[in-house]
Image (cartoon, helix red, strand yellow):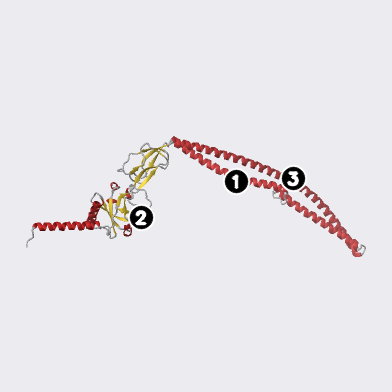
């Protein structure tokens, strides 16, 4: 039995429609097997450039197509000389203040040194007077010692002369005892005077060396004044040295500021990396303040994909998973891998070339590392779709399925 061509064509149409419906349903239900991004963009790290001083900005001729070298100037800022003048005035006031403090310390140190010299001179006079007095007493003691030695010799001679008489019975025992007692008393008197002389010699030596062993109350008071003044002079001298150092540093800074006022009328803002100026946050001729964001330089070697996924994909995405990045509007795939995963409310946003509006604060943000050879600066800001799989690089068949899924899903989302 031969089929009618119209019946065959109808069957083919029904079969093709059924196939399209099946493929469409499969593509629409693809996300449970392949986590896909709700929103994604090719991005890069941006380095902020800030002004270091007040002034007026003037950008150099630069565009996103021109790569600035590391350390190259991207803008010039004409300094605010009014600020320099105010700073110099403030520094001059500080200089006068420090000079006044140093002068006061010099005066205080001078007064303490004069007081210390007066006390030292008086103590020296007291010591000399004491030494003179002790020398007079020493002379008297030495005279008495000579007298007692002569008396002792006389008493010893009497004892020698009376001893034979006592032995012969001519002199009584009482008389002999009296002679002996006088000799003993003479020895005791001489010994006492010699002891007094030794003490006087020690006192004289101590006073002459300034180390009196028997300093009176006046000497002790003068010594306290000298020691206290010496300590205060030492403390004030240290403080004066510190103030002089601070004053010298201040004057050096003033000299630098004055030199800046005369010669350094401008300064350059340079880029710390090699890359193009991506954003300008001020315009030529605009006044800038210190630490104001002026521009951003993008790092060409830091391209990545910033992708947002629904929270229910959190358990299906892992760091190191393969990522297929489809550039929207182009039949182009970029291969990559998941480098970072975080929930929106927990992550800190870093400086980026493109500030993406987060579709939902409860979504997942994934950072996708991509091959620098497969993307360039022109791709920054392009929207992409990202499919993540854990089994490795996708085949051409899978890429076709992914492309079809993205096309159908784009039509559905629209």
Residue corresponding to mark 3: 129
Residue of label 2: 342
- First reached walking from the N terminus: tag 2 or tag 1: 1
**Marks 3/2: CA–CA distance:** 92 Å
Q: Nearer the viewer, residue 275 or 348?
A: 348
Residue 235 is marked as 1
Q: CA distance from mark 1 to mark 3?
A: 33 Å
Label 3 crowd (10 A; few <14 / some 14-19 / many >=20): few
Sort mark 2 into few (<14), some (14-19) or many (20+) by Cα contacts within 10 Å. some
User: What residue do we see at 70% from left, 47% from top?
Assistant: 221
Image x and y of residue 1, in percent: 6, 63
Answer whether labels 1 and 3 touch (C-beta < 8 Å).
no
Residue 259 appears in which quarter of the rendering? top left
Mark with earlier residue (1, 3):
3
Front residue of 336 and 225: 336
Residues under labels 2 and 1: Cα distance?
A: 60 Å
Residue 373: horizontal and vertical position, in percent? 28, 51
């Amino acid at each position: 039995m031969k089929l009618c061509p119209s019946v065959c064509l109808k069957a083919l149409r029904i079969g093709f429609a059924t196939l399209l419906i099946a493929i469409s349903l499969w593509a629409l239900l693809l996300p449970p097997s392949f986590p896909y991004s709700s929103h994604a963009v090719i991005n890069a790290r941006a380095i902020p450039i800030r002004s270091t001083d007040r002034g007026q900005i003037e950008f150099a001729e630069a565009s996103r197509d021109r790569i600035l070298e590391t350390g190259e100037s991207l803008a010039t800022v004409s300094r605010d000389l009014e600020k320099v003048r105010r700073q110099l005035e403030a520094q001059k006031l500080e200089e006068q203040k420090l000079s006044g403090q140093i002068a006061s310390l010099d005066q205080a140190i001078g007064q303490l040194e004069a007081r210390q010299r007066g006390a030292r001179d008086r103590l020296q006079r007291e010591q000399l007077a004491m030494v003179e007095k002790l020398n007079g007493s020493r002379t008297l003691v030495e005279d008495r010692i000579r007298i007692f030695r002569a008396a002792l010799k006389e008493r010893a001679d009497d004892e020698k002369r009376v001893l034979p008489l006592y032995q012969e019975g001519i002199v009584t025992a009482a008389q002999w005892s009296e002679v002996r007692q006088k000799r003993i008393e003479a020895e005791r008197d001489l010994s006492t005077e010699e002891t007094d002389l030794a003490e006087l010699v020690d006192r004289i030596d101590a006073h002459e060396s300034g180390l009196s062993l028997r300093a009176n109350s006046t000497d002790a008071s003068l010594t306290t004044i000298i020691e206290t003044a010496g300590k205060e002079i030492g403390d004030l001298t240290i403080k004066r040295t510190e103030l002089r150092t601070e004053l010298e540093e201040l004057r050096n800074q003033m000299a630098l500021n004055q030199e800046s006022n005369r010669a350094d009328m401008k300064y350059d803002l340079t880029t710390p990396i090699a890359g193009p100026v991506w954003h300008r946050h001020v315009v030529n001729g605009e006044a800038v303040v210190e630490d104001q964001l002026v521009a951003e330089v993008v790092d060409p070697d830091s391209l990545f994909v910033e992708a947002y996924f629904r929270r229910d994909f959190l358990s299906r995405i892992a760091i190191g998973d393969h990522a297929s990045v489809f550039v929207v509007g182009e039949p182009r795939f970029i291969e990559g891998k998941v480098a970072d995963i975080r929930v929106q409310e927990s992550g800190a946003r870093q400086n980026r070339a493109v500030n993406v509006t987060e579709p939902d604060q409860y979504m997942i943000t994934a950072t996708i590392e991509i091959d620098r050879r497969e993307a360039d600066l022109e791709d920054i800001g392009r929207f992409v779709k990202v499919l993540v799989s854990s089994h490795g690089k996708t085949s051409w068949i899978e890429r076709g399925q992914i492309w079809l899924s993205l096309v159908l899903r784009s039509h559905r989302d629209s």
